[in-house]
Amino acid sequence: MKTFEENWTAWLDGQLSGRDLSEFEASLLDKAAAEAEKANARKLGALLKSELGAPALTNEEFFSHQLRERIMRESSGPSVEREAKASTWWTIPRLLWTGTASLAVFLIFTVFVIRDKNPAEESQYLTQILNARVDPVVSPNATVSMFEAKQDRVTVLWTEGLQSLPADYAAK
Amino acid sequence: MGRSLAFLIPFVSLIAGAVSGGQAAETVWSGLVIAENVAQPQAVPPELTRIEGSLKKFFGYNQFQVIGQSQKALKTGQEDWLATSKFFGLHVDAQGESKAGYVLNLKLYKEKELLLETDAKLSKRSPLVIKGPQVGSGQLLLVLVIQ
């Protein structure tokens, strides 16, 4: 059972029909005054609709997106924010793999460079005997050999069987 | 500014050092040495001080006397020179310079008689010692050092 106010509001809005409408209009004491009031209410409604229309948003999607973001941020708290900041490509496993790979490349290059460099360094380091000849007529049994003393970096050409000479040959 | 200077000074020094190092002429000392065992050995000549230990160890003598020597400053790496004593002559013919040192042809003469010939690549850091003939109770050694 609707109250009078409910029926009155519905009648003003034109939402009563049939039996409800006829019963309500019959209950009105001054129907002409009520009709005048109804007309005024409709005029007022039309005026408000035309003057106070909701402003149209030019980019509704953007605003709703911003709003949703803000709500999510505020509701989820600071830990999620930190996680969001920390989520970069450089994760711990990736860092480890990158470090290991770099070290491996460094070692490979080092080994190759040292391998290539060592023979050259060795040859720079010590004097080399390229060849040696002893006059076979003067010293037929002479032999030559060579060795290196790495301690003092001395290279020695060692001859055996050269003709011995008297002490006079030691003169200056 | 300070950081740039700190970088620039060693860099320029390195370049200057490399340039001056490349241009410096090197001196080769060539010596005819008689090694002997004596009761009162004389001091080792300064040119041999660096290799005194090796000389004593390899040849077993306690005295080393220079009987002939030559010092040659190499500029082109194509020079030749002679170190002589009364009876011996060491002819050295430089046949080119490399990063490692000099390629040398060495000929040991006894008067005009060729006793020994060798080709060697003399390193700037490594002396060359050649054992020559026995002379009396001693031994003739040929020594070449880049100073």
Image (tube, rainbow, N blue to C red):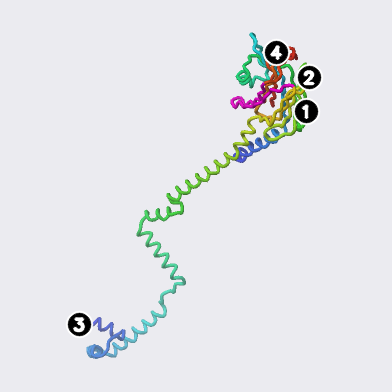
- Amino acid type of the residue that numbered disc 4 sits on in the rendered structure: Gly
Q: Which residue is mark 3?
A: A1
Chain at tag 3 = A
**Which amino acid lies under the numbered mark 1 shown in the image of this protein?**
Asp
Instruction: Same chain for labels 1 and 2? Say yes or no.
Output: yes
From mark 4 to mark 1, how far is it between C-alphas? Answer: 30 Å
Specify few, some or many for label 4: CA neighbours under 10 Å numbering under 14, 14-19, or 20 or more. some
Q: Is residue B18 left or right of residue A13?
A: right
Q: Nearer the viewer, mark 3 or mark 1?
A: 1
The CA span between labels 1 and 2 is 18 Å
Task: From the image, tell me which residue sits under label 2.
Answer: B111
Q: CA distance from mark 2 to mark 4?
A: 17 Å
Q: Chief secondary structure of the magenta span?
A: strand
Residue A168, position in %: x, y?
A: 74, 12
Q: Nearer the viewer, residue A160 or B62?
A: A160
**Residue A76 rendering spot, x and y as whole percentages:** 35, 58
Q: Mark 3–mark 1 contact, CB under 8 Å? A: no
- Do the residues under discs 1 and 2 have CB atoms within 8 angstroms? no
Q: Which residues are magenta?
A: A138-160
